[in-house]
Amino acid sequence: MSKKLLFSGLLLLSFFYHSRCISQSNEKTLVLSEILNELQERYGVQFNYASDLVENIILEAPKNNLSLEKALEKISSETYLDFIFISKTIITLKEKTIRFCGYSKDKDSNEILPFVTLYTGKNSTISNEEGFFELKNLKARDTITIEHIGYKPIRLAVNSLKTQEACETLFLTLYQEQLAEVVVYDFLVRGVDQLDNGSYQLDFKRFSTLPGLVDNDVLQSVQAFPGIQSIDETVSNINIRGGSNDQNRITWDGIKMYQSGHFFGLISMFNPSITQKVELKKNGSNTYETDGVSGTIAMKTSTKLNNDFKGSIGFNLIDAHSSVDTPLGEKASMQVAARKAINGFVQTPTYSSYFDRISQDTEIQQNTTMINESEIDFDFYDTSLRLLWQPTQKDQLRLNFIQTNNSLKFNETAIFNGQTEIRESNLNQSTIAAGLNYNRDWSEKLSTTVSIYNTDYKLDANNVAIEADQRFIQENKVSETEFRVMANYALSEQMSFIGGYDFTETKVTNLDNIDNPLFIRLVGELLQTHGVFSEVRLSSKDLDTKLTLGLRYNYLYDFNKGLWQPRLSFSHRFNENLSVEALGEFKHQSTSQVINFQNDFLGVEKRRWQLSNNESVPVITSKQGSIGMSYNKAGWLFNLVPFYKEVDGITTQSQGFQGPYEFERTFGSYSAFGADVLIRKQFEKNAFWLSYAYLDSQYSFQELPETSFANNFNISHAFTAGTNFTKGNWLWAAGLNWRSGRPFTALEVNNEVVEGELNFTNSNSERLKDYLRLDFSTQYQFNWGEQTRAQIAFSVWNVLNRENEINAFYRLNAEQQAQRFGQNSLGITPNLSVKLLFL
């Protein structure tokens, strides 16, 4: 009996299975283009559509007994396509537009998240203070990216939405490593934010503009913050709270840069088309960051895979530039950017103004032989690449490459015994660097990062003196390799831990080669440094209080020297309007820039890098602390940050003395006390700001006749007023910069020369005249086609054409009389930019 029942059951199952297979075989699943071909033959109609509109769409074919209208209605309900009857027999396919709206919330607390960024290739928006967002006119093939600082990004395919009017709640998940959170949006202008670790971030995706700029120049933009100036208007000489430029750590995706500017410092060498964000830290660095006793400027490219082709091409009156960001399959994308000077094709007024600025009081101007302007050749270029590969959701590999070059050539002509002698002098400055970064998320709590980079910097000059029948070759090279491994572990939602190890090897060589009389000096130095670091990050449940405590140990192998360096970052938010912060750090660095001769490298770039030897050139160490307060309400922001800093181990050669201590060789220290103040008011899309920086910085050199005197970079008072105005597609910006003159050493009046030597007054006891500059810029954007946006910008630097003297020094002339040399800033300098963005 049981066998019969079993046999009957198997027959019944076989019957149902066979019937189901027959039923399924009658319901064909086809590519949409094939379905449309069948409908054309069946109903005698013609479909007009672009082939890419129906690519990769597979669905069940409508049943044969349906009318044409019902068949098209079924297809439309299962796709994002509309069928439009042009006539009874001609039908056009059109992609539907979708509206996506809703509210953004924290997944764990269910609290509203304001200011969340949502964007596609064409559309973008930011959720308001209530967390509400809305994106219109989306296409089915679009992908929405949702980002918020401190939260994991979300990528959402529009074709996955259930309805054409999709309003839903987006839940964002916190990164377990508790990344820095924005505490003040639009700190200065749109896209400039203050983070809860005391640092500042420039997000060029949201960035508006700053006065005097036509492009997003990275290192010009950071000078808008109080407490940061350039003593000579160059990006290669940025001074943070009294420090020299070599005391800044400048990185590009973690790669340390020993060169920062084109045009020998007048513009940034980092292409803004590929650099997405910049983080500025004056104090309170993380323990995995080393060097940079005055501050850190960290430039970063995007870490998000790009699934759509994007690009740009443009030019201004200095250079032409382009970029491409393209997917390489589904798991990789590559971004390439390039830029080149255009003076080889046309010499613009902007180029002439820049060239006159860098050639002041250099070999080019002062040479006694004849140098025609047509015999001067200047050029610069840069190329950069970033490759992202994400083989799994837990793994990401990033490769970076950058190459830059500045070159200057000119011919010197002299006549001897009726014969013409022509010889070429040249100067080249270049950087080539590459880095590899691998990140793995082992779980929601544990992630690791392994990175390695190598950077090579070279500066060389070939200087000829026809009258002396002499050739002088100078060369400065820096080669650095760093390896780092780091782990990040979240013990809980309120506590995380970072620990790791890094190894750095730095080699610096300096060459001086004179052929008449023969003299060759080659100095090579090598230093290896091991670093171990850890830090713990704590936060309250409401995230109003955050504390980061860290400790770093550096072992300088060649000196058998160890350095302990604690770090502190604390912030507390009393309410929605008032917050305070406390920052502190101990740091060190082993490289510095020196000036051996004022005519180094033809006088255009006088500085060369040197490595500490722990004796005559000490390891530079620093300690600093600051306490800040911010009040933000109804568009008003008041920010006050007093600070104190001590830096020990500086040398006289690294400070650029041009008075009595120009050729002294000794080391000392400096202290800096001051405050940075900012007042900003926002009016919807418009903003107005006032900033003020006070600084009192003093040198201490025990082996000099004057053991204490003012720092060469002591700008006692600096004031900035600016405004940013937006109306429609127009963006306007204007700004006024005023600061007290830089210190310099004057001569005794009516007693300038004593026994054939210059008779100086007390060092840095005098100041140049106050510096004043008014800048203006405007920008207009408009759509030029469905996937192209055009941008035209115009700026004027130093609108008033004020002659600002930025440097002054004295020399003895041939008659043994004192002669004063001065260097002026840029005069009135217009610039124009035209750019096409392919979205």
Image: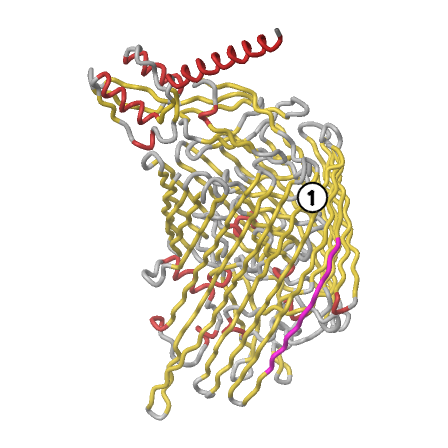
x%, y% of residue 473? Answer: 51, 79
What amino acid does circle 1 point to?
Val
Q: Is residue 142 left or right of residue 476?
A: left
Q: Is residue 27 left or right of residue 294?
A: left
Q: Is residue 671 visible?
A: no
Q: Identify the image quadrant of residue 420.
A: bottom left
x%, y% of residue 299? Answer: 56, 49
Viewer-proximal residue among 127 and 170: 170
Q: In the structure shown, which secondary structural element does the residue marked by tag 1 occupy?
A: strand
View extreme (bottom): residue: 417
Q: Is residue 493 visible?
A: yes
Residue 528 shown in magenta = yes
Most frequent secondary structure within the magenta stretch: strand
x%, y% of residue 442? Answer: 67, 40
Viewer-proximal residue among 465 and 330: 330
Residue 785 against residue 815 in the figure, above or below:
above
Range of magenta residues: 521-532
Residue 480 against residue 277 in the figure, above or below:
below
What residue sits right under mark 1 in the picture? 641
Viewer-proximal residue among 818 and 388: 388
Residue 784 against residue 261 in the figure, above or below:
above
Q: Which residue occupies 58% across, 8% down?
A: 5
